[in-house]
Amino acid sequence: MKNRQIMLALVAVCGMVGTVAGDAVDIGGRLEMFVDRYLVDSMQNTALRLHAPRDEGEVLRYDAPWEGSFCGYNTVIYDNGRYLLYYRGKRLISPDGVSEVTCFAESKDGKSWVKPKLGLFEANGSKENNIILAEGGITHNFSPFLDTRPGVSAAQRFKALGGVQQVGGGLYALVSEDGIHWKKMQDKPVLTKGAFDSQNVAFWSEQEQKYVACFRIFTAGVADAKEWKPSGLRSMSRADSPDFLSWSETMPMKFEPAQEVHLYINQTHPYFRAPHLWVSTAARFMQGRRALTDAEVAALQVPKGYFGDTSDSVLLTSRDGLTYQQTFREALIRPSLRLSEWVSRTGYPALNVVPTGPDEMSLYVNQDYTQPTAHLRRYSMRLDGFASVNAPYEGGEMTTKPLLFKGSQLLLNFATSAAGSIHVEIQDADGKPLPGFAADDCVELLGNRLALPVQWKKGGELGALAGRPVRLRFVMKDADLYALRFVGSN
């Protein structure tokens, strides 16, 4: 265990968070979003701001006879121009792994979804349905991913984990070539030490060059196949594997600041434009916190036991694979004016944030859980727009830590008001403005752009500065800075 901790610590320092050269952080040519204080050294009258996704409405109703009001644990995968959706089909209250199937839908744009008739499994006397799995336990929380490991065989382009302790004793590994026809990699579970009674996710970690699983644990008590005594907070643990079959010992994830409430599902995934950064759109579960009256519960037809809690989603991030940064304690998506979103275990996000346009990304949320209106809802955001460095009308500034970069041009994802602006200053590692790159030399940035090159009076060529420690100082007024990236050849 000690050697493993040392290894993970080295990964944290030299892999996922970027190589540190002296006091400088080497970001190379990576996209860096302002979702935490990783690049921030000082802020004056500016602050990190979380941005709420826009509700785009219902995109899929769980209305087939084999689906129903207890559908959940959704996964959305973007695969080369097509969108794939996986979710649990479940009509009635029953123990985990009982009366459940795994359903599939597809889309060309991530907005309009179709449930294909696959002819794989029988339901209600017919195979004319969208069921892709019907094995108890695995179907409770089946969660697939597109394997991005270099050299992965075509027969294993898709991988998945699924299973519960009560049925089968843990998580099973599955593979597929097309994302529809699945088979187990072996007849026994690959992960057995955990609670697993929710959605458990996996992915290929580009930085670690291993598969990583993030799964449900409780902060106290024991949860394994022989003894089921969960207690404490619902939380997350991780394990890793070179081949998706042999997994390391599990290690509880840490939280900064410390975890205070239940996190029901973690939905951790590498951000699709910056895979070194893990994004978690986790479900926050407020057990025993009731929002509805008896009359409202009756009108919504909420079953007994599913109206005494509330939930929403929060944004967590990780750069080292060991610690979740809870930079924002506010909700990413609040329950809306619709009373149906104020019941127990509703508002749980689907796994993955995916691109749905040249300037848009989307996440999906399971709403109206346990109710006749249960459905999946889409929420959109600007590209890289989870959070920003925000400056008010009065103005402010932010200065980065010393950075090392590769490239010859600095691109910014930003937005200003008509009266707002951003000026960028490049300093040496000690904070002294470099000749020709002071804030007063910068051509004012005005507008709303995803990737606008920064220019100074002398131009925007930065190749001569690549590889040496520099700081970036942003002087801002009524503006948001979402992300930055250095591009081009040196």
Image: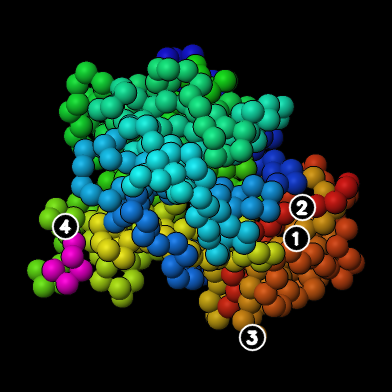
The disc labelled 3 sits on which kind of residue?
Ala
Closer to us: mark 3 or mark 1?
1
Residues at marks 2 and 3, CA–CA distance in whole angstroms: 27 Å
Label 4 with label 1: CB-CB less than 8 Å: no
> Residue at the spot x=31%, y=75% of the render?
337
Q: Which residue is mark 2?
A: 486
Label 1 with label 2: CB-CB less than 8 Å: yes
Q: Which residue is mark 4?
A: 303
Looking at the picture, tell me which residue is in the foreground, 7 or 421: 7
> Residue at the spot x=86%, y=62% of the render?
460
The disc labelled 4 sits on which kind of residue?
Pro
The crowding category of the residue bearing disc 4, from other C-alpha atoms within 10 Å (few below 14, some 14 to 19, many at least 20), is some
Q: Earlier in the sequence, mark 4 or mark 1?
A: 4
Residues at marks 1 and 2, CA–CA distance in whole angstroms: 6 Å
Q: Which residue is mark 3?
A: 419
Residue 411: mark in rendering: 1
The disc labelled 1 sits on which kind of residue?
Leu
